[in-house]
Image (cartoon, coloured by chain):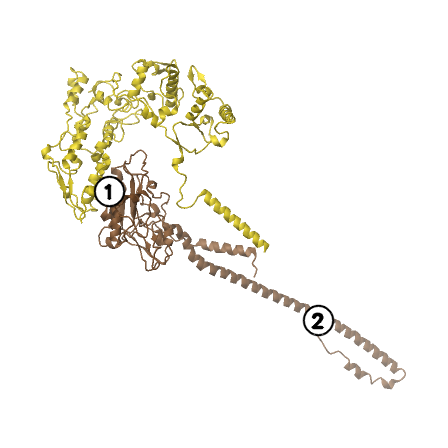
Amino acid sequence: MRKGRIRLGRTGIILIAFTVTICLTGTGIYGSKGPSESAAQKRADIIRIDSMKTFGKLERPPVTFLHQKHTEALAKENKDCSACHLVENDRLVPKYMRLKDTAKQEVMDTYHLNCVACHKETADAGQKSGPVVCGECHKDKPDLVSIWQPIGMDKSLHYRHAKAQDQKCGRCHHQYNEVTKKLYYAEGKEATCRYCHKDITEENRISFQLASHLACIDCHRKTLAKFNDAGPISCDGCHDPVQQKLIEKLKDVPRLKCNQPDTVFVRTAKSGSQNSNPVSRMKLVPFNHKAHENYNDTCRVCHHANLNACVQCHTQQGTKEGNQVTLEASMHRLNINTSCLGCHDLSQRDPKCAGCHNRIARTRQQDPAACQACHMADVNRVAESMQHTAEKDLAAMMLDSRIPVAHTFAESDIPENVEIKTLSNQYGPVKMPHRKIVQTLFGNINDNQLVRYFHRDKNTLCQGCHHNSPTAKKPPSCASCHGRPFDEREPFKPGIKAAYHRQCMECHGAMGIEKPVATNCASCHQKKG
Amino acid sequence: MSITRRKFLGWLGAATAGTTLGKTAGAASNKHFSGYAKSMGVLFDNTRCIGCRKCEEGCNTVNQLPAPDRPFDDLSVLDTQRRTTAKEYTIVNRYDDTDAGHVKVLGPLFRKVQCNHCLEPACASACFVRAFTKTPKGAVIYDASVCVGCRYCMIACPFEIPTYEYDKALEPRIMKCTMCYPRIVKGLLPGCVQACPTEALTFGRRENLLKDARERILKFPDRYVDHIYGENEMGGTSWLYLSAVPFKKIGLREDLGVTPAPKLTSGALSAVPIVVGLWPVLLTGIYAMSKRKEKIANEETARAVADAVEQTNAAAAAKHAKEMEQVQKLKQKEIENAVKKALEAAARPKPEEASDTQPEEADQKPSEEDS
């Protein structure tokens, strides 16, 4: 009898422990949701300290360090950067409390002793402090979400900096002399830091991250001390998306002088005169460099590796330095904004254009005559003419011969209202304000020279809706091609109902038009019966 | 009877070995079932769906389901996530988390929830009365007349689709989408497909829908996630999905794997006949054999004991007989001696009494030769 009672008691305790474990951990319960992601803290100042990597495989996870949190805490105690960073050659050393990495134990001690000591002190003083236990710093999966956004020089920022430095470019721009192993300023060769300083620190060249922080933050610090007004020195000031929006952006920035051409023919040969490349037989492309400078915020959108002409690396056959990208690909590849066609194509994603262009499959298969839109200049004729006319004038002439004026049909030829009554068993006919739509779209086109040029034929605009049919003043009705749905032989052609609905709804959606709401049937056609 | 540990382990080993000798059965067949040829399916494209709920209305009309609590044009029901119910074969859910990485998705996305008409349905596999049938047309249909209401199908379905008419006291049924089977055999469209204004639902042969979906992804690569949900999930479903965002963001589980549900249990189930058939026979046989062995062993022991006893008795008797003989001999000798003495004594004084004693000696000779 007693034995039985003991057994019962034991089973009971085990059952209770089991249930409690399941409830607390919540694992294995179907449909239970884990901790919500929004509980994670959003920070722009997360640094992962993995300096021990240089000494071999890490034994513990890298430490997640919040830089701004520390600068703010130290600022409250009137301490500045020198609390953690040593100064060498009048510049702050980015490493923590040391000039360089010496031996494994020393570096580890530097971190452990100094960090933990400071944390202990602060805690002893009765304030909120950081962790002192190993696992609290070396957290594998901290509950943080990084909202860090990169920042770079754009035309407006650069102009402001140049003005502040009295146009003394040598204050920031330098070159490196391999022989003397010294930095020097080379006038006329200024470019973005990124051309030399890459993602990681190499032998003799620090990473872009280090370089930018050293150069920018140091200068800001000194300026702040002298003039009380300078750029940001906190992480958030540059990298927090909200703060980034507060950075003043000048509208009219004077053109940056860099010996760049105004108008030029796109080079197809590495060296020699423009026309001397016998391999390329395509007509030359006149290029308005000056106008394109206004289309982008930085030069490095196109000049992604250096400021030279594309063909220096992207030859006709492709080279190693050009990553084997041929000249043709560098000019025409889609979905990338460093190529001509790619950038033009990406501009079609603008809501003003997306209504029609979202539905056109992005392929390069176009009418070969479309090439002529850019490839205008006969090589031999250019060669002849260049004997007595400067290249830039020739190019300018060719560019001017393009007439970037968009056309559409005369107003009287565009029906004002179109009644769509093909399907009307459940809903009444639709009265579509056709002319208003065409005129709105035409207004969108007229904004931009590129767009105007490509819509110079008056039929082009109509093809946005009146697609897959020959151009005409009176294009065929939708019902001439769209009939019953789900025809196996034509899987891509929707039936007439979906053709109408998708044509209108997808365009409205892509252009961000809020009225009429797609789910409000009555806003377009009245319900019957 | 008490059983020794060795015997028990021996039986266990024999039973297990016998089970593993058989071949495990594959579900349907041992090859991958990719659907009946020419079976139909539906492709849902959430970049086309506007969340108008006309599909719910169409389903309700065609299947003569009861009127809903809130009308179909009330889009505020989309504020909560719903599931299929006994009165709704299909519902539409709205998903506001449209973070697709680098591609910007405009507006919330929607998904239509209904039976996916798997190629190898878990519900059909779990049902022990064969209430579900996977038709060659592709639809998985339900026969209420044989259903016992155990609701194993509801547990088995990885998409949690079948619902039950708990509110009905008599003859409650399992309720789930039928792909409008009576309509599609007549060449009509399912109710939801018919009603959709934007052809977010495309009806056609499953193999053609897969080709169509692949072409859409090819033509508009930045519009879709490069995966057709339902192509292989749970062995393949007839209802396929294309999405602008990762599928788990629109409520479709991505952890289901590609093994069809019946195959998950076919291994264990195929062991049942062998267990039921083999184990009783095998174990009974072993039992019988060992029992018989014991019996024979017992018999032999008994016989050996009996033999031994007999031998011992015989030896004892022989010994006894020998000794008796010797005793007799001695006695005889004594008697002879006594007679001789008597004779001698008689011969000396009185010679006339000597002839009387001789016949008495002949009577006293032992005649038994006992064992």
SS for callout 2: helix
**Residue reaching furthest bottom?**
B352
Relative to A314, is A50 on the left or the right?
right
Answer above or below: position of A448 versus A384: below
SS for callout 1: loop
Q: Along the line of sight, which residue is nearer the eye, A521 or B138?
A: A521
**Residue reaching furthest left?**
A412
In the figure, the shade used to draw chain B is brown
- Whether residue B306 is visible here, answered yes or no, is yes
Front: mark 1 or 2 = 1
Q: Residue A450 at what x, y percent from top left?
A: 19, 27
- Kindly identify the residue that appears in the image at 18 percent across and 20 percent down: A395
Amino acid identity at mark 1: Thr
- Crowding around mark 1 (Cα neighbors within 10 Å: few <14, some 14 to 19, many 20+) is some
Answer above or below: position of B145 versus A468: below
Amino acid identity at mark 2: Ala
Q: Residue B160 at what x, y percent from top left?
A: 35, 49
Label 1: which residue?
Answer: A519
Label 2: which residue?
Answer: B317
Q: Residue A396 at what x, y percent from top left?
A: 17, 19
Relative to A366, is A97 on the left or the right?
right
In the figure, the shade used to draw chain A is yellow
Of all chains, the one bearing label 1 is A
Cα distance, mark 1 to mark 2? 120 Å
Q: Residue B224 at what x, y percent from top left?
A: 28, 38
Quarter the N terminus of chain A occupies: bottom right
Q: Along the line of sight, which residue is nearer the eye, B361 or B104?
A: B104
Q: Are marks 1 and 2 in contact (CB under 8 Å)?
A: no
- Crowding around mark 2 (Cα neighbors within 10 Å: few <14, some 14 to 19, many 20+) is some
